[in-house]
Structures are given as C-alpha cells and as structure tokens.
Amino acid sequence: MTTSHHLPANPGDHGGPRSLDGNDRLARLIGWTGVGLGLAELFMPERITRSLGIEGREHWVRACGVRQILTGMGALSDHPGPALKARVVGNALDLAALAWVRREPQAHQANINGTMLALGVATALEA
C-alpha cells in the first residue's frame, strides 16, 4: 500500500514517523484556512469590499486572495516554515492596508475593526 509523506499506511495506525504531530496539524489548519479565505477573496471580492465599505478596492482583495491561496498551499507542504513566515508578513501588510482604508469616510469602521482584530489574533497564532 502506498502512503503519503505524513499519513500512516493503516488508518488505525496513529504512531510512527508518518503520523501528524501537533505542529503539522496546526500548519494544515492554517493552510486550509488560508486556501478557503483566499478563494473567497479571489471569487467574491465585491461582497468583502461592500461589507467593509471600501467598494472599488476589489483588485486589492483579489491580490490578497492569491497570496492567501499560495501561502496556504505552502503551509500544506512537507516544509511549511517559509510559507508560514510569508503568511505572517502578508498579514502585517493586510493590517497596514486596513488601517489605511479605515480612514476613508465611507468605510464601515466596526467591520474593519473586527477584521483587524481577527487578523491580529490569527497573526499572533501563526507567528
């Protein structure tokens, strides 16, 4: 029977070098979350910009989505370290961009503040 790099040959076998440890599971969670969020940003940017009150910035949201997908896929790889570091840097850039657009008069302050809080917590967990 063939096995993947991380998964045991037998579904009931939870030990040995091929099982996922806590760091691997966290990297997978971060990776799949990034891919899912990235797909939403890539294919539904209008909904995101509307909820934040920053219509017209869809290109920015799509670019963030591409980055989320790429770093998420990297976090799912056998060597997630560089992708996780790139996610933290990308999150910092996203926080800076949100702080910038929050100053616009039509921006929905509460939604942007909530997004920044969630992004800050995620960044702290990923760092």
Image: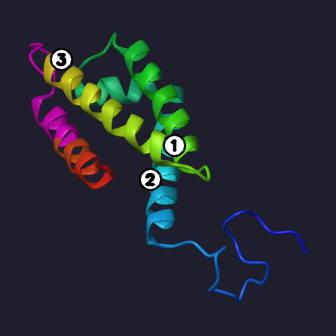
Colouring scheme, one of rainbow, by chain, secondary structure, one colour: rainbow
Quadrant of the rendered structure where residue 26 is? bottom left
Secondary structure of residue under mark 2: helix
Nearest the viewer among 7 and 38 is 7
Q: Quadrant of the N terminus?
A: bottom right
Give the x, y percent position of residue 81: 46, 47
Q: Judge whether 13 appears above or below 84 on screen.
A: below
Is 119 positioned to the left or the right of 42 in the image?
left
Secondary structure of residue under mark 3: helix
Give the x, y percent position of residue 61: 40, 22
Magenta segment range?
Answer: 101-116
Contact, mark 1 vs mark 2 (Cβ under 8 Å): yes
Nearest the viewer among 29 and 113 is 29
Q: Judge whether 93 appears above or below 5 on screen.
A: above
Q: Judge whether 3 appears above or below 112 on screen.
A: below
- Image point (13%, 37%), residue name: 113
Give the x, y percent position of residue 88: 32, 39
Residue under numbered circle 1: 72
Q: Judge whether 120 appears above or below 69 on screen.
A: below
Give the x, y percent position of residue 35: 53, 43
Residue under numbered circle 2: 30
Q: CA distance from mark 3 to mark 2?
A: 26 Å
Is 49 positioned to the left or the right of 121 in the image?
right
